[in-house]
Image (cartoon, rainbow, N blue to C red):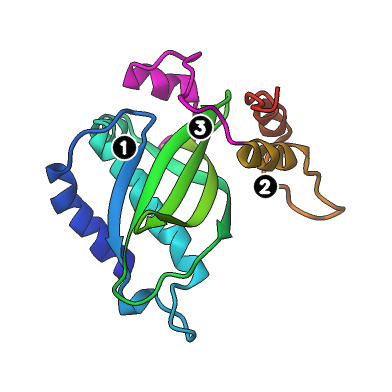
Amino acid sequence: MNLLLRLLWLAVAGGLRRAVPVLGPCRTPFRVWPTDLDVLRHVNNGVYFSIMDVARVDLMRRAGLWKPILARGWYPVAVAETIQFRRALTLFQRFDIVTRVLAWDDKAFLIEQRFERAGATVAVAYVRARFLARSGDRVAPTDLLALAGVAPDAVVPGGVPEAAARWNEDFAAWRPASGETSPATDGERAASAKLPDPRR
């Protein structure tokens, strides 16, 4: 219910916020509500991922992509997510999520989402996300970039943070144990290895 209310608020307030570049950064404001808290009275770790969904929608709306994406029957899905917590968020505190696209390959986008409060970083998350069509087909990132008017070989300002590159490499190299289901196909693992390495 809390996520639904935030999405409804985004539909109202999002149209009043300034437009942002397709690749970000996009700063989305939030406030901590009682339903976000766990028994220790700080934001539950699972809530972070739900709020991140809203912030990614805000990026697509303010970049002018949300309606064209829906018109084509496309929708985003998260393939993998990781987060590092640095500080706690407590009741009624204001905070922002800064969302930006770091890189892409022929399967998915690598996205950074940074939680900030009063100028301090609260948490940093990386998301590997792709788009699917209602028909069940995968939508190539290049198709989405073309829709947004972004060249497939565009350089993202600031490059890929080392932590994001390492996480993506680990995901690409991961192999399931016997009987374990892999979160990525062999094609996705091979493709994800093509992301630029900022350490070079």
Q: Residues within 10 Å of mark 2 (few under 14, many from 20)?
A: some
Mark with earlier residue (2, 3)? 3
Determine which of the numbered discs, if any, sits on residue 60 in the image.
1
**Residue at left offset 54%, top offset 62%:** 86
Query: Compared to 135, does 17 lie above or below?
Result: below
Q: Position of residue 187 (x, y in %)?
A: 69, 29
Query: Compared to 42, does 108 lie above or below?
Result: above
Q: Do the residues labelled 2 and 1 touch (CB within 8 Å)?
A: no
Disc 3 residue type (three-letter): Leu
Q: Disc 1 or disc 3, which is closer to the eye? A: 3
Out of 137 and 64, give the one closest to the viewer: 64
Q: Disc 2 or disc 3, which is closer to the eye? A: 3
Q: In this view, does 44 lie to the left or right of 173?
A: left
Q: Are marks 2 and 3 in contact (CB under 8 Å)?
A: no
Give the dominant element type of the magenta stretch: helix, strand or loop: loop
- Which residues lie in the magenta part? 134-161
Q: In this view, does 26 lie to the left or right of 168?
A: left
Mark 1–mark 3 Cα distance, whole angstroms, equals 15 Å
Under tag 1, what secondary structure?
helix
The residue tagged 2 is 183
Determine which of the numbered discs, if any, sits on residue 73 in the image.
none
The reply to whether residue 21 is in sight is yes
**Residue at left offset 43%, top offset 83%:** 41
Query: Compared to 54, does 149 lie above or below?
Result: above
**Residue at left offset 31%, top offset 37%:** 60
